[in-house]
Image (cartoon, rainbow, N blue to C red):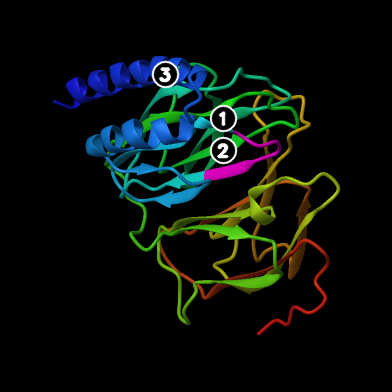
Amino acid sequence: MKGISTLLLTFGLMSMLALVSASTKDGKEPRELASRYLSPHFQTYNDSSVQCGEVLNATSGGISYKAFELIEPNERCVWVIRGGNTDGFRVNVLYLGFSYDPNGTQIVASCLRHYFEAYHEILNQTGPEPHLGICNVLMITFATGPNVKDSTGFVLQYEALGGGVVSPRSTDHLISTGEPGIMKYPETPGQYDDNEFSTFVFEPSNNIYSPGKRINLIYLKGLMESHFDYLRVYTFNSTSTELEKWEYKGVINDDNTETELIFNQDLILIEFHSDRNNPGTGFQIVYTTSGVEGCQVQ
């Protein structure tokens, strides 16, 4: 039944594209047409996210972002997909409303793995993406370039394959840096869990990349098991010459630092990994885009 539903959905999308093309010439709004057709058909198959970035916990679902609306320059939208407790994903790209540009608009699927370095795949064509079979968390980054012309967004489906063994207390966080603040982990007093794998994405204000502005993070040492529990740091660099723009920056743990400054002009991803025993009380991160004045550690 799921294969039939996918086929019908794909056929429906193609029909909708033809309808939008014809109706736009008659002066009708693509957004109005999309809301009348796409939303009910897509959501009857499974849950879908239509906003710019979200944490998704359903074991199957989709993302339908501005499929028939014009995208804006320098958008930064991140979806973190936990999918229950899983060890892999299936992803099928149903629609792309833009031309892939390694120096402009692109979608990056990041396979985040407990105790291993992440790897990244560019989603630059429709159809299944076969290289996401060993992931505990799937992260989708939609980054638009400075020149988007008349481009629209995208639609994709995902399915979590199950079989994961990370702690059910693992969590995912999307954090806007428009206002300075302090993130404590765990959020409530006490210890984190064994085998935790939690993620933290620090985003620019209003999900719009502004050249010249910088996200500043200060890691403050708490209590983590020496060497075995740690943070992995990645930064997004839209001007990188690499095909995928996420860059691995290294590890932070209680062995080597009391505090650590992390900064980037774009998105920052931090993963927290713990092993099978001796949990600690965690850490804090101060975040701001204009210095740390006014932030008081508690």
Magenta-drawn segment: 71-78
* Amino acid, disc 2: Thr
How far separated are the C-alphas under marks 2 and 3? 24 Å
Disc assigned to residue 107? 1
Tell us which disc is closer to us: 2 or 3.
3
Disc assigned to residue 47? none
Instruction: Count how many numbered circles sit on residues in the image.
Output: 3
How far separated are the C-alphas under marks 3 and 1? 20 Å
Residue 171 picture location, percent across and down = 43, 59
Q: Which residue is mark 2?
A: 141
Q: Earlier in the sequence, mark 2 or mark 3?
A: 3
Residue 243 picture location, percent across and down = 67, 23
Q: Is residue 52 magenta?
A: no
Farthest residue, direction bottom = 298
* Amino acid, disc 1: Ile
Q: Which residue is mark 3?
A: 17
Q: Are marks 1 and 2 in contact (CB under 8 Å)?
A: yes
Q: Earlier in the sequence, mark 1 or mark 2?
A: 1
Residue 90 picture location, percent across and down = 35, 29
